[in-house]
Image (cartoon, rainbow, N blue to C red):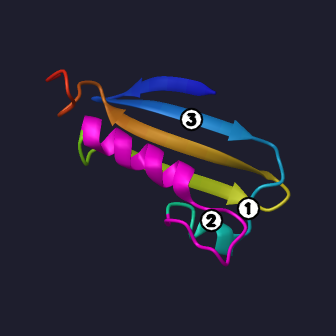
Amino acid sequence: IIGYQMGEKMVLKVSDNGVGMAEDVLRHIFDRKDKERKHNGIGMGNIRKRMQLYYGESCTFQVDSEKDVGTAVTMMIPREAQGGRDGR
């Protein structure tokens, strides 16, 4: 897990050296539940939606993965929130 500032954004990156994901799985990582697939897609989509509700559309996610190598999730958020319940 690493975090750093890049201009007006904060970058958070979580990576592992696990089994990774095949390209067809990665392509659907933010999709809603799909009964024909083994994963349900709720977790990543839920996190992305909640972060974008709080930080606005400038909150971005990038997921890089390679089968048998690992996965890295990079989230870029503005240093200051654009929305949210507390008005930040």
Picture residue at 53% right of the left edge, 50% below the top: 44
Q: Is residue 11 above or below residue 27?
A: above
Q: Does the stretch in magenta take in 13?
A: no
In the picture, the disc for residue 26 is: 2
In the picture, the disc for residue 13 is: 3
Q: Residues within 10 Å of mark 2 (few under 14, many from 20)?
A: some
Helix, strand or loop at mark 2: helix
Report how far apart the C-alphas of labels 1 and 3 lie in the structure: 17 Å
Amino acid type indicated by mark 3: Lys
- Answer left or right for 5 relative to 34: left
Check if mark 1's residue and mark 3's residue have beta carbons within 8 Å.
no
Q: Is residue 67 above or below residue 58?
A: below
- Give residue 35's quadrant in the image: bottom right
Residue 40 shows in this picture: yes
Check if mark 2's residue and mark 1's residue have beta carbons within 8 Å.
yes
Q: Nearer the viewer, residue 12 or 32?
A: 32
Report how far apart the C-alphas of labels 2 and 3 lie in the structure: 17 Å
- x and y, in percent, of residue 60 in the image: 38, 47
Image quadrant containing the N terminus: top right
Q: Residues within 10 Å of mark 1 (few under 14, many from 20)?
A: some
**Disc with the residue nearer the chain's start (2 vs 3):** 3
Amino acid type indicated by mark 1: Met
- x and y, in percent, of residue 65 in the image: 68, 57
In the picture, the disc for residue 21 is: 1
Q: Residues within 10 Å of mark 3 (few under 14, many from 20)?
A: some
Which residue lies most toward the bottom here? Answer: 36
- Answer left or right for 5 relative to 85: right
Q: Nearer the viewer, residue 39 or 10?
A: 39
- Part of the protein shown in magenta: 31-55
